[in-house]
């Protein structure tokens, strides 16, 4: 029977299938796929055929469905993509046909039809289970992130509410520490919402690049940062921005990315420290650099890149989701730029956003003062 | 002469503004307030100062609120101190774990000052 043929020639089939998988240009084969995946697929196919050829119809369908569902779960946990699942089953099937033809094995057309039917069933069940688990996993992740978002929101609203209640009594002044608490938490609420909006827009692919004067963007970001700095007792320096420089960006995403860098600077710098926001438009290649320098004391160079990974926190200060820098990087990338960090040992970090600058025709665009509209085409 | 020392409430929260505001409203309600920024500080303060009530956040760096509550409720000197958990965590699971750790009451942020003061007074009345 065919399943016996597969068992007897297992090693040869695995070797041939591995060659086919490795030679595939897309999807590219991963090392685990070559080492373990091919044998997984062949064993699943062999088992499916054994059920088909030795059991009753009802038992066969149940066992195939259960086996394929378990296999789908295994494949997902092993990190396989759906494309790899479909192609690997196909490569294994081709290897079976090749060996059978070479050895002139006595496998009937009916058995080959059975092989194809089992292959279809195995792929369908594995992909269905894979997709189902993926969906559950995404739903769980979504719930977790919503939970964290609600937690952040709840804390900020709680602080703002208590501060407002205290101010309402008239026993404390708006310009004192209670007023500062209210201002600080309202600003953080705004940042949280902006960051969440950026995340939603990135995930939904809803971004649009417009011509934005650099001065306008920096003014918007600087204003919010100045409020936060004052509320926290920080010194904030914002260097002058060269007029007439235009960048082509999604304004909301860029503003959210910059706001995130500045919020992090305030969060991780020493108390009452100094944060500096600079722009450099003098690069000969025409790139625009926007830098945020903090006084966090510096970080180990080897962990610098990891800061941009989701759910990473720089210190034990765990307020926040650890998503800000990951979202900021994605936002800058969508806008054709890049973001990086360098450490100043013992002093702080400098986060740099580098963006392409519009050179052709930029100076011809003279938006009237206060206008937010690009010129008509 | 009657003892007129106001009851001491220990506020445990890693958020600076949260500690400041809860301290403000509890002092306005007539309580004396001590502050701690995480679970470790809470255990030390509870042992040293013997507060009448503890208000505990859950997610904190170092020793978190769940574990701090559990240790307070099993410590010989601290097990009878009422612990009111006050957190912005939205998921039911967090409440279940806090109750399992032994907290006496669970409040969600945002919480009005009236609700918080009422919870503290209930805790004091039970003691």
Image (cartoon, coloured by chain):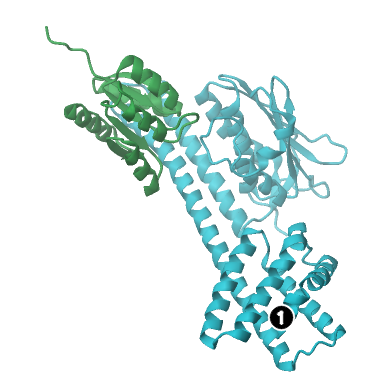
Chain colours: A cyan, B green
What residue does disc 1 label? A4
The residue under the point 61% across, 68% down is A71
**Residue at 70% across, 49% down:** A249
Q: Quadrant of residue A313?
A: top right
Q: Left or right: where does residue B68 sit relative to residue A58?
A: left
Taking the image as shown, residue B106 lies to the left or right of residue A275, namely: left
Residue at the limit of the structure toward the left, as seen here:
B1
* Relative height, residue A173 to residue A193 (above, below): above
Q: Looking at the image, is B90 positioned above or below residue A9?
A: above
Q: Label 1 lies in what chain?
A: A
Q: Quadrant of the C terminus of chain A?
A: bottom right
Name the residue at 74% across, 71% down.
A88
Q: Is residue B42 visible?
A: yes
Q: Position of residue A234 (x, y in %)?
A: 57, 22
Q: How busy is the neighbourhood of tag 1: few (under 14 within 10 Å), some, or many (20 plus)? A: few
Write down the quadrant of residue A308 in the picture. top right
Secondary structure beneath disc 1? helix
Please provide percent x and percent y for residue A21.
80, 68
Q: Nearer the viewer, residue A82 or A56?
A: A56
A377 over A1 or under it: above or below: above
Q: Residue at x 48, y 45 (%)?
A: A148
């Amino acid at each position: 029977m065919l399943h016996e043929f597969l068992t007897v020639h297992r090693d040869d089939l695995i070797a041939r299938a591995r060659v086919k998988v490795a030679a595939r240009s897309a999807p590219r084969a991963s090392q685990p796929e070559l080492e373990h995946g091919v044998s997984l697929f062949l064993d699943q196919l062999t088992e499916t055929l054994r059920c088909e050829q030795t059991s009753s119809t009802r038992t066969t369908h149940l066992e195939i469905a259960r086996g394929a569902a378990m296999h789908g779960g295994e494949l997902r946990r092993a990190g396989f993509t759906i494309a790899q699942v479909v192609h690997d089953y196909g490569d294994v099937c081709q290897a079976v046909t090749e060996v059978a033809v070479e050895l002139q094995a006595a496998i009937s057309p009916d058995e080959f039809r059975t092989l194809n039917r089992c292959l279809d069933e195995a792929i369908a069940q594995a992909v269905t289970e894979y997709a189902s688990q993926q969906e559950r996993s995404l739903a769980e992740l979504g719930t977790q992130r919503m939970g964290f978002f609600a937690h952040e929101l709840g804390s900020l609203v709680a602080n703002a509410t208590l501060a407002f209640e205290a101010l309402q009594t008239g026993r404390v002044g708006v310009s004192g520490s209670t007023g500062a608490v209210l201002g600080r938490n309202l600003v953080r609420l705004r940042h949280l919402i902006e960051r969440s909006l950026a995340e939603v827009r990135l995930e939904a692919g809803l971004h649009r690049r417009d011509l934005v004067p650099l001065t306008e963007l920096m003014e918007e970001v600087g204003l919010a940062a100045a409020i936060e700095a004052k509320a926290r007792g920080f010194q904030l320096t914002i260097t002058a921005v060269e007029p007439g420089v235009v960048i082509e960006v999604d304004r909301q995403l860029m503003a959210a990315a910059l706001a995130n860098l500045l919020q992090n600077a305030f969060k991780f710098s020493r108390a009452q420290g100094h944060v500096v926001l600079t722009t450099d438009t003098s690069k000969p290649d025409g790139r625009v650099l926007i830098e945020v320098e903090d006084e966090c004391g510096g970080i180990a160079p080897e962990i610098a890149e990891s800061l941009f990974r989701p759910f990473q926190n720089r210190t034990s200060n765990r307020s926040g989701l650890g998503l800000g820098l990951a979202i900021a990087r994605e936002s800058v990338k969508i806008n054709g730029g890049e973001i990086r960090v360098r450490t100043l040992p013992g002093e702080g970090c400098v986060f740099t956003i580098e963006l392409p600058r519009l050179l052709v025709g930029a100076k011809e665009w003279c938006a009237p003062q206060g206008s937010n509209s690009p010129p008509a085409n | 002469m009657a003892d007129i020392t106001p009851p001491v409430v220990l506020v445990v929260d890693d958020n600076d503004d949260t500690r400041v505001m809860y301290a403000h409203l509890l002092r306005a309600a007539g309580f004396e307030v001590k502050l701690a920024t995480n679970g470790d500080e809470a255990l030390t303060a509870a042992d040293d100062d013997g507060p009448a009530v503890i208000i505990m956040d859950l997610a904190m760096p170092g020793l978190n609120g769940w574990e701090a509550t559990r240790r307070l409720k099993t410590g010989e000197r601290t097990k009878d101190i009422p612990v009111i958990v006050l957190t912005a965590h939205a998921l039911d699971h967090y409440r279940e774990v806090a109750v399992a750790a032994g907290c006496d009451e669970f409040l969600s942020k945002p919480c009005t000052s009236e609700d918080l003061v009422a919870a503290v007074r209930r805790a004091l009345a039970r003691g």
